[in-house]
Amino acid sequence: MDWPRPWYSILWAPWRMSYITNVVEKKEGGCFLCESPKMGDDRKALIVYRGRQAFIILNRYPYNTGHLMVAPYRHVSSLEDLTDEELLEMIRLVKASMEALRQAYRPEGFNIGVNIGDVAGAGVPGHVHIHVVPRWKGDANYITVIGGTKVISQALEETYDLLRPKLEEAAKRYGLS
């Protein structure tokens, strides 16, 4: 029997299951975006910059090297729930993130996005955050598409050490420090 093919292509991403499973477990135990700033060890928590209203954290399951998330300290589920001060600082932190990533990795482009709600693909639907993903030609290559494996070329600790001082510098330029 021939099944009708959809108009769109399907990219199977089984490597994402560990992330999904981890998020479900975290939902039961608390929000990692709320808990990470309270850890007391920014390096262990992967927090590369702390602002007054929001912070920048490395994605533990990155799409690419340098994948950052900008989140408010306050646990809110949507952009509409943010104060103007929180939203403005988050946008400034996105701008600082782009500058730091450009200096560190020279990406050819960026994906910047917010997934609000489970159906929109939010991994943490209760805590709004902005993804900043550096992109290069060929970063979704053969091994990703055919092999179901994403190659991340740098350890998270190395990424942290490289980006933290660059984010501090960029944040100063945007009046965040």
Image (tube, rainbow, N blue to C red):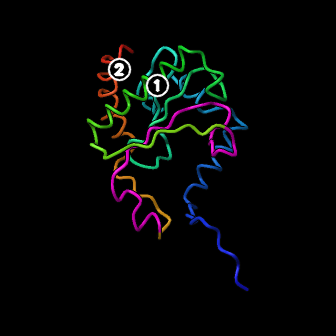
Which x, y percent locates residue 55?
Answer: 48, 24
Mark 2 to mark 1 CA distance (whole Å): 12 Å
Check disc 2: other Cα within 10 Å, few if <14, some if 14-19, many if 20+.
Answer: many
Q: Is residue 10 left or right of residue 161?
A: right
Q: Which residue corresponds to the image point at 39% horizontal and 53% vertical from the top-left?
A: 152
Badge 2 amino acid: Ala
Which x, y percent locates residue 34?
Answer: 61, 26
Q: Residue 125: within the magenta?
A: yes
Residue located beneath label 1 in the image:
91
Q: Write the start and end of the magenta stretch as one range.
A: 117-145
Q: Are marks 2 and 1 in contact (CB under 8 Å)?
A: no
Q: Is residue 16 left or right of residue 65?
A: right
Residue located beneath label 2 in the image:
171
Q: Residue 171: within the magenta?
A: no
Badge 1 amino acid: Ile
In the rendered view, would you say 133 is above or below 38?
below
